[in-house]
Image: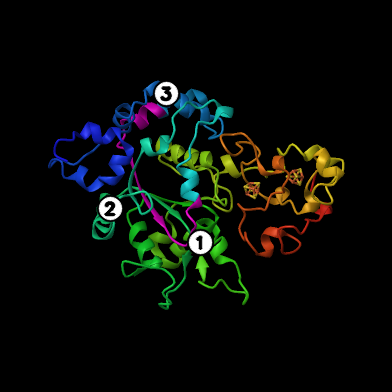
Amino acid sequence: MSNVSKKELRNNIATRLSNHLEIETLDETPLIETLGERLANAGVSRRTFMKYCMGFSAIMAIPTSLMPKLVEAALLRPVTSVVYLSFQECTGCLESLINVFPNTQYKTDSIENILLTALSLDYSETLMAPSGVQAELSRSQAIAKKNYVLVVDGAIPDDKNGAGFFIQSGKTGLQLLKAAATNAAAVVSVGTCASFGGLPAAKGINGLSPTRAISIKAALKSFGGTYATKPVINISGCPPIAEVIAGTLIYWILNKKVPSLDSNLRPKMFYGETVHEECYRKEFFEKDQFVESFDDAGARKGYCLLNMGCKGPITHNACTTLKWNQGTGYPMQAGHGCLGCSEPGFWDKEAIVGQGVGFYKPLDRNTIDD
Ligand code: SF4
Ligand code: SF4
């Protein structure tokens, strides 16, 4: 290890993640790296980063004229430290995040995984190589540095009575979250499970979540004091769109503040519209031309999927604007309705399905504006 220069380590994100502890012991001076240095060492030019941010400027509601100043200021700041915790989840959200591909639609530049370049991912159980005591040490060192962004995926069992639904290194999920949130500048709940409870909070056969799963915001609220007022950003979706996660974190890097949020704490820049508003099938919705069964004549003509249970009219997300898979498409283009995955109550609460429970139960056409 001693033959490896700091620069070499910084150049290789995977190496940095897997050798985080060793990086800290290379010399006695702390590694305080600016974002500009990080990008330069990773081969990302200032111009390229600027173009990437410009690509997001319209979506982030930042005037293009302001962007150069914000980028210049951000480049001089220390790299934003991220502590990433996972609770009751399926790892789909992290899978989505690490697939931050260039979005051709918004002409962002070819910087794969720019997030891992622009951020110092100081703790992530899924991505880091250290385990056991070393991993614990990594986390406590990151927390001691303060002012990191705490990113969380997964719901958290409300097992204050010691039910033991989530135990890691002898601590409950609630204890781990509380410790990690203490010094966090902001908490970003990635995915519907972290944002609203999601699948783990589904009611189950007894009408109760088997693990009493709650959202990260609800858990923080239950701690009271400064935890209850800690800035929280919900990036809902099952999973969220990669560019939505990336764009929100880039907004934080540039502005060091929480973006404008809706009543469910989601960034308005990505969740300000329903997926229905920009859906290409909307012209059929307006003419009351609906698919009545999959593969009927209407389905072949691309009619609206409302009667097949589409929840697009009540679901706020960027699926029909940013789109999925490098900006190439979204579910309604593939012939299936929206399930409402980014709304509170997804999977089985009545709040999301409006007039009844079920992915395929249609919304009432009369309650939806054109
Ligand atoms: S109801 Fe669904 S399929 Fe129909 S226009 Fe709206 S989002 Fe598209
Ligand atoms: S279309 Fe609906 S269910 Fe599908 S990803 Fe978007 S918000 Fe989620």
Q: Nearer the viewer, mark 1 or mark 2?
A: 2
| Picture quadrant where residue 359 is located | bottom right
| Picture quadrant where residue 59 is located | top right
Secondary structure under the numbered disc 2 in the rendered image: loop
- For this orientation, the residue located farthest to the top is 47
Q: Answer yes or no: do the residues labelled 1 and 2 have beta carbons within 8 Å?
A: no
Q: In this orientation, which residue lies closer to the viewer: 15 or 81?
A: 15
- For this orientation, the residue located farthest to the front is 295
Which numbered tag is attached to residue 48? 3
Q: Quadrant of the C terminus?
A: top right
| Mark 2: amino acid | Pro
Q: Quadrant of the N terminus?
A: top left
Does the stretch in magenta take in 121? no
72 horizontally vs 343: left or right: left
Does residue 303 appear in the picture of this structure?
no
Secondary structure under the numbered disc 3 in the rendered image: helix
Instruction: State the extent of the magenta-drawn residues as a range.
Output: 71-92
Q: Residues within 10 Å of mark 1 (few under 14, many from 20)?
A: many
| Mark 1: amino acid | Ser
Which numbered tag is attached to residue 215? 1
Q: In this orientation, which residue lies closer to the viewer: 57 or 363?
A: 363
Q: Residue at x 28, y 41 (%)?
A: 16
Which numbered tag is attached to residue 130? 2
